[in-house]
Image: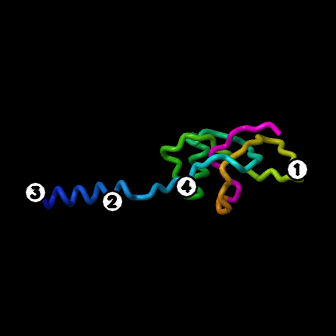
Amino acid sequence: MFSKLFTTAVFITLAAATPWNGPPVTTPTSDQCCNSVVSSTSSAASAVAALLGLDLTGLDVPIGLSCSPITVGGNNCGSTTVVCDAPEEEWGGLIAINCIPITL
């Protein structure tokens, strides 16, 4: 009986210690021009995240899709201007996390 209880406790501990594969959410610091901003629970955000191997499960923040950085020299953003978490290079501008609209 003790053996089964110990084994169960070990599995529960390991499950709790397993790292979450989702993207980090930090304070937005990166000005971006995105084609659209959608909820992280939307099918569009889920589809793009799946292409990149990201898991957005449990995340409830605005997601920027098809984004490019706004530079000091100017970037005529004809879409949605937002400040986001700095997107990872490997995401290729396809997605940005925690995007908040800004007025330039």
- The magenta segment is 92-104
Q: Which residue is mark 4?
A: 54
Q: Which mark is residue 74?
A: 1
Direction from residue 87 to residue 13 in the image, left or right = left
Q: Looking at the picture, which amino acid does disc 3 mark?
A: Met
Q: Nearer the viewer, mark 1 or mark 4?
A: 1
Point 75% across, 48% down: residue: 32
Identify the element where label 3 is drawn.
Answer: loop
Q: CA distance from mark 3 to mark 2?
A: 20 Å
- Which of the two labelled residues, at mark 3 and mark 2, occupies the earlier sequence position? 3
- Which of the two labelled residues, at mark 1 and mark 3, occupies the earlier sequence position? 3
Report if residue 40 lies within the magenta region. no
Task: Mark 3: give few (<14), some (14-19) or many (20+) Cα within 10 Å.
Answer: few
Q: CA distance from mark 3 to mark 4?
A: 40 Å
Q: Looking at the picture, which amino acid does disc 2 mark?
A: Leu
Point 70% across, 49% down: residue: 29
- Which of the two labelled residues, at mark 4 and mark 2, occupies the earlier sequence position? 2
Direction from residue 77 to residue 1 in the image, left or right = left
Q: Which residue is mark 3?
A: 1
Residue 85 versus residue 80 in the image, above or below: below
Image coords of residue 54 (percent x, y): 55, 55
Q: Looking at the picture, which amino acid does disc 1 mark?
A: Gly
Identify the element where label 1 is drawn.
Answer: loop
Q: Which residue is mark 2?
A: 14
Residue 62 versus residue 89 in the image, above or below: above
Report if residue 103 lies within the magenta region. yes
